[in-house]
Image: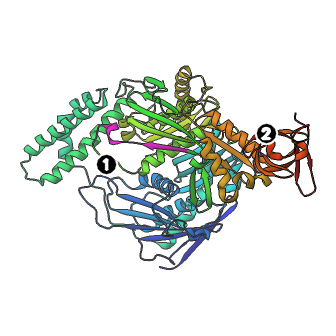
């Protein structure tokens, strides 16, 4: 293949796409350079499909190499290990808009691998990776209905920023990633600081307009490469089977989709599917392959399910559980449900339930993240768990999957805007959302539960945050936006649109579109309907809990902060750490000291914190002439006694300063280990301290 290179200006960056030089044995490969952030994206498609599969086996792997940032990996093996959270989230970010662009029925294995080869710390590698994946698929000849464009949007000083740098994002009120085709937006992932729905919609449309240069450049490159299209046709529906399935199942399936209980409904549908399959197989007089016939029945049955559910919604009939398009399912909230945790909440919305637990920790509980841009500490962690029992299934329980990491990150982004600053609240926070029941939008239930659990723990969050998931059914010009979607409505619908926020504005927005043709007006309707639903949920949450608890749990650590002079840090630590080790052991506290002299003392018992603070104050205190101190005699001499009166501070009480009357021997009045009160008389140029006992008398 001849090397082809294309460049264009994208915001304040120059983007270069190159193919035909590296990874030439892949089906297609594109190198993307965005101001020295370079990502190699390869695509390999297997040319034989599996007729037993009714899904697209697409795998997306985004991987970062430490050498890209001139770093050597940490750890014993000094090489990259399991995917980091950033790698997992970016893999999902690439996958989500690509998947709906493959033609329906395509079931060949496809793997997309994006490798970060060079990193400019100011330019995130996710946008180049998404552009590279779109370009590589467009050059591959696979049945891919792209190309796809991608852009990052910021918002500052009432204006949008296209592909802002890491420095610009620090002062931005918005971080949004948008992906779309020439005609429609397919995916949105964002975090905002309580922005209005109008600003959020404007950001989506701004990104879609600006990404057209990406799409046009990829089209030009594909035309120059001239890749031959795969010889593939979507499998045709068996019309004989289709007619028979409709005859046998339509009436009963329509009735089954009016059963409100999820498990009962699923059981009824599964029984009906099995009965129809058995009957059609028994009628198989033409001796067709029974496995193929079974797959045909399954394929037709699923299409009939979709037609029934979508048709009822569009004609204005009640939804599966009897609601109209705007009603939120019944909500039940309990807080403080776990006696020994620092904060807890049980949030139930219909058949979706999240048990959310908040834990407060100290500085040393922060998560150390070793990323390409360097090592940093994460002081707010939100973990989402989705056990198989939550949907009535038996399954493997182990490390979190991509979906769990993605849902946890979405909930975290939704809540982060209302958290207090580190100066206001010095605790490290960990929130865990256990999904105990699921039937639609457990990630949004996690946001609501997190807001409540944090307030129950006494975290001074500024406001409640609620999340709601919206759906869409669209046929031609007719469409219906659905509030608080069920699992079936998500599966059979055209959009998954999740919005989180406070009464003042949006804090997170995530959107995945399954069809080409979502207009600006539909998105505006969805945002407005989501705002109404969010306000409704926030009202119920506020009725349950007006604000953060004044008193934290008795089991939560207490943290007291103080500042000491930087030159006194070594005195508190002591030689080889002996002083601070003694402090922590004797007071039962955890003590952290930063380089600028900020001391944080934590313990479950407030009195222990106060005792440790008192001791640190003594260690760092300066000796003041004229002040009286409590001391201990440590050594007797002929001419006086050495007294320790502050940690590491000693002075001499001359024999003439022990008592008002004259004494013959020091030992007549003093003994080693005796507690005495002394007054500082003088500190000479060498720092020697002269003390008096008789001045105190």
Residue 569 percent across, percent down from the top left? 74, 53
Q: Secondary structure at mark 1?
A: loop
Q: Secondary structure at mark 2?
A: strand
Point out which mark residue 676 bears. 2
Query: Which of the 4 image quarters holds residue 174?
Result: top right
Residue 39 percent across, percent down from the top left? 55, 67
Camera sees residue 430 = yes
**Residue furthest to the top:** 543
Query: Which of the 4 image quarters holds residue 329?
Result: top left
In this picture, is 463 found above or below 636? above
Q: Nearer the viewer, residue 569 or 335?
A: 569
Dividing the image into 4 quarters, which one contains the C terminus? top right
Please tell me which residue is depicted at 63% across the width and 51% down the height of the picture: 581
Q: Is residue 623 magenta?
A: no
Which residue is the site of mark 1?
396
Q: How is the image coloured?
A: rainbow
Mark closer to the observer (1, 2): 2
Residue 409 percent across, percent down from the top left? 52, 46
Q: Nearer the viewer, residue 660 or 535?
A: 660
The magenta span reads 381-393
Whether pointer 1 and pointer 2 mark residues with C-beta atoms closer than 8 Å, the reply is: no
**Of the image marks 1 and 2, the number of the one nearer the N terminus:** 1
Specify whether 626 is left or right of 373: right
Please tell me which residue is depicted at 46% across the width and 38% down the height of the picture: 433
In this picture, is 347 found above or below 684? above
Residue 317 percent across, percent down from the top left? 36, 25
Query: Which of the 4 image quarters holds residue 438?
Result: top left
- The 10 Å Cα crowd at callout 2, few under 14, some 14 to 19, many 20 or more, is some
Camera sees residue 198 = no
Q: Is residue 383 magenta?
A: yes
Q: Nearer the viewer, residue 501 or 283?
A: 501
């Amino acid at each position: 293949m001849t090397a082809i290179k294309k460049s264009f200006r994208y915001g304040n960056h120059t983007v270069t796409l190159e193919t035909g030089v590296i990874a030439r044995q892949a089906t297609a490969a594109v190198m993307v350079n965005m101001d020295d952030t370079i990502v190699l994206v390869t695509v390999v498609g297997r040319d034989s499909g599996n007729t037993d599969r009714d899904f697209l086996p697409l795998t997306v792997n985004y991987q970062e190499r430490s050498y890209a940032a001139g770093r050597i990996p940490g750890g014993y093996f000094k090489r990259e290990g399991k995917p980091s959270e950033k790698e997992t989230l970016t893999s999902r970010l690439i996958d989500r808009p690509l998947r709906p662009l493959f033609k329906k029925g395509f079931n060949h294995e496809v793997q997309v691998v994006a490798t970060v080869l060079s990193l400019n710390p100011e330019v995130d590698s996710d946008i180049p990776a998404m552009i590279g994946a779109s370009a590589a698929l467009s050059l591959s000849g696979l049945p891919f209905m792209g190309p796809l464009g991608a852009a990052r949007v910021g918002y500052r000083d009432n204006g949008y920023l296209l592909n802002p740098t890491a420095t610009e994002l620090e002062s931005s009120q918005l971080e949004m990633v948008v992906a779309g085709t020439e005609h429609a937006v397919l995916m949105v992932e964002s975090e905002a600081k309580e922005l209005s729905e109008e600003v959020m919609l404007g950001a989506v449309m701004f990104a879609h307009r600006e990404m057209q240069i990406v799409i046009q450049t990829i089209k030009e490159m594909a035309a120059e490469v001239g890749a031959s299209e795969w010889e593939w046709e979507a499998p045709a529906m068996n019309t004989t089977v289709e007619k028979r399935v409709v005859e046998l199942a339509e009436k009963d399936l329509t009735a089954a989709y009016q059963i409100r209980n999820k498990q009962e409904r699923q059981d009824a549908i599964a029984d009906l599917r099995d009965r129809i399959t058995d009957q059609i197989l028994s009628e198989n007089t033409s001796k067709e392959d029974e496995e193929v016939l079974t797959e045909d029945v399954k394929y037709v049955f699923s299409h009939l399910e979709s037609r029934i559910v979508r048709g009822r919604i569009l004609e204005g009939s009640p939804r599966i559980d009897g609601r109209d398009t705007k009603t939120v399912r019944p909500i039940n909230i309990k807080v403080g449900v776990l006696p020994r945790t620092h904060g807890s909440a049980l949030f139930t919305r219909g058949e979706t339930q999240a048990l959310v637990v908040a834990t407060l920790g100290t500085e040393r509980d922060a998560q150390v993240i070793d990323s390409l841009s360097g090592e940093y500490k994460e002081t707010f962690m939100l973990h989402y768990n989705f056990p198989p029992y939550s949907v009535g299934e038996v399954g493997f329980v182990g490390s979190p999957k991509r979906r769990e990491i993605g849902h946890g990150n979405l909930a975290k982004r939704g809540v982060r805007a209302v958290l207090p600053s580190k100066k206001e609240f010095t605790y490290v926070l960990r929130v865990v959302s256990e999904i105990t029941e699921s039937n639609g939008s457990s990630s949004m239930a996690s946001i609501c539960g997190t807001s409540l659990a944090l307030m129950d723990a006494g975290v001074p969050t500024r406001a409640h945050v609620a999340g709601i998931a919206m759906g869409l059914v669209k046929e031609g010009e007719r469409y219906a936006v659905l509030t608080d979607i069920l699992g079936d409505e998500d599966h059979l619908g055209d959009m998954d649109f999740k919005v989180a926020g406070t009464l003042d504005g949006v804090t997170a927005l995530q959107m995945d579109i399954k069809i080409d043709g979502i207009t600006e007006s539909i998105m505006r309707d969805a945002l407005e309907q989501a705002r109404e639903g969010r306000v409704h949920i926030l009202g119920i949450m506020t009725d349950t809990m007006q604000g953060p608890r004044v008193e934290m749990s008795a089991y939560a650590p207490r943290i007291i902060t103080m500042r000491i002079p930087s030159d006194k840090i070594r005195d508190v630590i002591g030689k080889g750490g002996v002083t601070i080790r003694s402090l922590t052991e004797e007071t039962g506290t955890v003590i952290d000291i930063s380089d600028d002299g900020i001391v944080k003392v934590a313990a479950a018992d407030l009195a222990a914190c106060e005792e440790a603070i008192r001791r640190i104050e003594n260690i760092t205190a300066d000796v003041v002439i004229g002040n009286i101190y409590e001391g201990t005699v440590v050594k007797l001499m002929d001419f006086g006694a050495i007294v320790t009166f502050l940690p590491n501070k000693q002075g001499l009480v001359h024999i003439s300063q022990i008592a008002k009357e004259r004494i013959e021997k020091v030992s007549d009045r003093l003994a080693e280990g005796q507690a005495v009160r002394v007054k500082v008389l003088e500190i000479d140029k060498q720092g020697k301290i002269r003390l008096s006992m008789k001045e105190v008398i």
